[in-house]
Image (tube, grey):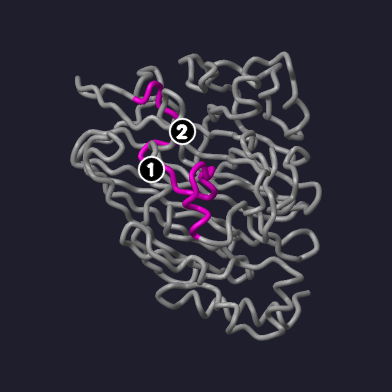
Amino acid sequence: MRTKSKLFMSALIAAAAIGNFACTPPAENKSTEENTMEQTSTAIPDSSNFSGEVNGKATHLFTLVNKNGMQVAITNYGGRIVSLLVKDKTGAFKDVVLGYDNVKTYQKRGEPYFGALIGRYGNRIGKAKFSLNGKEYNLEKNDGANSLHGGAHGYWMQVWDAKLINKTTLELTYLSKDGEAGYPGNLNVKVVYTLTDNDEVKIDYSATTDQATPVNLTNHAYFNLNGAGDSTILNNELRIAADNITPVDNTLIPTGKITPVKGTAFDFTSFKAIGKEIGNADDEQLKFGKGYDHNFVLNKHTLKDAIATVKSPVTGIVMDVYTEEPAIQFYSGNFLDGRSKDGKGGVAYPLRSALCLETQHYPDSPNKPEFPSTTLNPGKTYKTTTIYKFSVAK
């Protein structure tokens, strides 16, 4: 049963969400009762730490709240999910995404895309170049010889224009100009975050262009259903409705082949602890990725089908993933190192303390004609939806 202080806090945040810039009140304006509650339970970061200016545009933190008290906090800097509070098996709220307490930390060099919107092209493009309609385009190299997540100036570091539609819906828009990071065409992008009363974070992506261009948008939330700041996701159980993956070379670029998962460490067609086979020294693909960092080719599905599910044996929290995309990138947090304690609440995020399930088209598709096309042409609209739904195991 929720305490009076929790009910009061939820009502206070919901009221704030109706304003122009929905956010939790500054700490100095909170009552002693509220501050005590925050010290003993999960809370959204102070919104004042996200009020600033980057490249001449204002940044803010927006908090969406549904009828069940679930909350998601999003900053328009990179369109990032900063916090996601869901109920565990005891009825207490847990923050299940990694992030930072202020916008400045998100701007640090080498920050690992926590919670960010990714574009113009999610994942990797080999040798940072591609040809389209007879012309070669050279992209920003930011992953060795390759381009990763839109290059060194991807959408994850841009300030998006924000419009709070209501207490459960936030609309973000961004004009990606012709030539930005090497991509052709002016791309008008719109992303709508909706927190439904069914405890779903729904992400609707759309885009239009004035020149042919590859587009592959996704979100890079780092989940730990044990709770953000927990040291591992290896005990989380995962299922992915994918009979195949696209194997990679030692730079994590797909070879162009599609290979079955059966009999390999990549078989998640039934629930399996993430850590069960991650240390398989005989698996070349695991060596290349330093763990799981691979594109899973989803079996035939619609938006009504859960294509991936994660379960925490600690909190009982379950996350189902739904998407219209043909694939999903499962990343097991292999490059988190825990060297700094700049996570929310001053915690470190060590190796494999989070996982990502990035819905997408295949990596390097612009260079792989055998893969599903990612080309968007003028007069057409890019549209896709992904949903992360939360519940408690029964």
Quadrant of the rendered image containing residue 337: top right
Q: Which type of secondary structure does the marked residue at label 2 adopt?
A: loop
Q: Position of residue 51 (x, y in %)?
A: 45, 68
Residue at label 1?
Answer: 154
Q: What residue sits right under mark 2 in the picture?
A: 123
Q: Is residue 321 above or below residue 129?
A: below
Residue 43: x %, y % from top left: 65, 68
Mark 2, other Cα within 10 Å: few <14 / some 14–19 / many ≥20: many
Packing grade of label 1 (10 A; few <14, some 14-19, many >=20) is: many
Magenta-span inclusion, residue 71: no
Residue appearing at x 52%, y 16% in the figure: 249
Residue 390 vs residue 247: left or right?
Answer: right
Q: Residue at x 64, y 26 (%)?
A: 290
Q: Is residue 187 above or below residue 128?
A: below
Q: Is residue 195 visible?
A: no
Residue at image location 43% in from the left, 72% down from the top: 21
Q: Nearer the viewer, residue 40 or 394?
A: 40
Q: Nearer the viewer, residue 7 or 56?
A: 56
Residue 189 at what x, y percent from top left? 32, 49
Magenta stretch contains residue 115: yes
Q: Quadrant of residue 331?
A: top right
The image quarter containing residue 278 is: top right
Q: Could you say which is closer to the camera, residue 115 or residue 313?
A: 115
Q: Is residue 27 above or below residue 182?
A: below
Q: Is residue 379 left or right of residue 275?
A: left
Task: Answer whether labels 2 and 1 touch (C-beta < 8 Å).
Answer: no
Which span is picked out in magenta?
103-128
